[in-house]
Image: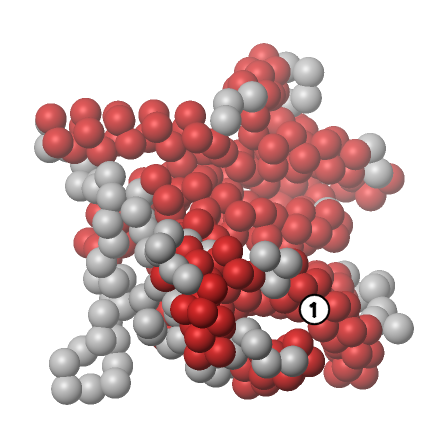
Amino acid sequence: MWAYLVRRLLYYIPLYLCILLVLMLLLRIDVDSAVAGQLGKQATPEQIQLKKDKMGLNDPFYKQYAMFLGDVFTLSFDQRSWEQELPVGEMIRKALPPTLMITLPSLAFTAVISIAVGLVCSFNRGRFLDRGLMIAAVLGMSVSYLVYIIIGQYFGAYVLGQQHGITPFEIEGYEAVFPPIEGSDGAWFVPGNWIKYCALPVIIGVGVAMGYDTRFYRAVMVEECARDYIVTATAKGATSKKIMFVHMLKNAMIPIVTRIMISLPFLIAGSILVEMYFSIPGMGRTMITAINGKDFPVVQATVAVFAAFVIVTVILTDVCYAIVDPRVRLS
């Protein structure tokens, strides 16, 4: 397995370097306007050139590229943000936990619920329960993510929360779920903070993804129902629960793993909308704010992190294949 991982990394490193190269080239097509935006409308050409010298934008491109690669592979990101005058690495370290507090629970809840619903639908295919769940899934797929956010904020946070005091959800803001303990380097979990600021975005994320995932898992399970081993298990008198959760689920792990791992990058992309509308200071909101402000160092760093995350996800998908199915060999 280690030899396989090394080969895959050697394959993807040139691709990753090309992504970073294209990113830096695109950002420097109109670098003068970005610098002028930092200085204001009254900036003179001399002031723009002085600012570019200070930011290192007048250095040879190969030097800028080499410095950026050094920041990426050492994970330091020492360059400072143009807007906030903070080290980019510090901004990423602060933005990453809020994003993980939303995306990871969304992925876990969506996978568990969708797989269970897919199993139920496959064993009741063609019946009223199956048709009703599939109609609900199609309706859920037909609604925009933004509509879910608006409805969730209005009913979940405003109507039930502020008017009736039933739910503790907040429409905007974020407080650390793992705040540091005073006088030590440790941290402790605050469930109240997670429920208050992250639970509603997670519920919305699960509602959005349920329609797509349920239909996919149902199709996988229906196909597995026609396999010979299911017919044999049924003939031997195995119960429906044993067939579903022992035989069928085990043999359907390859498409399940594929679906879960492919969903990870889309969850990060989907969190951008949630973070913007809930004012959560995560990676997505940090990147969008940097793009709007033409804050090149932050844009470069966040895109580099996202690209690395996608590549690692692809590699881990193949590794998970070998873990869940002994027939798969990493050769």
The chosen color scheme is: secondary structure
State the image coordinates of residue 104 (x, y, percent, origin top left). Answer: 46, 55
Residue drawn at x 47%, y 32% as measured from the top left: 145
State the image coordinates of residue 140 (x, y, percent, origin top left). Answer: 52, 24
Give above or below for 223 relative to 73.
above
Res 223 → quadrant? top right
Label 1: which secondary element: helix
Residue drawn at x 73%, y 37% as measured from the top left: 220
Res 163 → quadrant? top left
Q: Residues within 10 Å of mark 1 (few under 14, many from 20)?
A: some
Give above or below for 65 relative to 217.
below
Give above or below for 115 relative to 3.
above
Residue drawn at x 58%, y 67% as measured from the top left: 304
Give above or below for 243 relative to 65.
above
> In the drawing, does residue 103 fall left or right of residue 156?
right
Instruction: Give 45 or 233, whichever is nearer the viewer.
Output: 45
In what quadrant of the picture does the N terminus appear?
bottom right
- Farthest-out residue, top: 128
Instruction: Give 145 or 242, whichever is nearer the viewer.
Output: 145
State the image coordinates of residue 254 (x, y, percent, origin top left). Answer: 74, 52
In what quadrant of the picture does the C terminus appear?
bottom right
The residue at which mark 1 appears reads as 21
Q: Amino acid at mark 1?
A: Leu
Is residue 231 visible in the rendered image? The answer is: no
The number of numbered discs placed on residues in the rendered structure image is 1
Is residue 251 visible in the rendered image? The answer is: yes
Res 161 → quadrant? top left
State the image coordinates of residue 230 (x, y, percent, origin top left). Answer: 78, 39
Instruction: Give 152 or 4, whichever is nearer the viewer.
Output: 152
Instruction: Give 2 or 83, whichever is nearer the viewer.
Output: 83
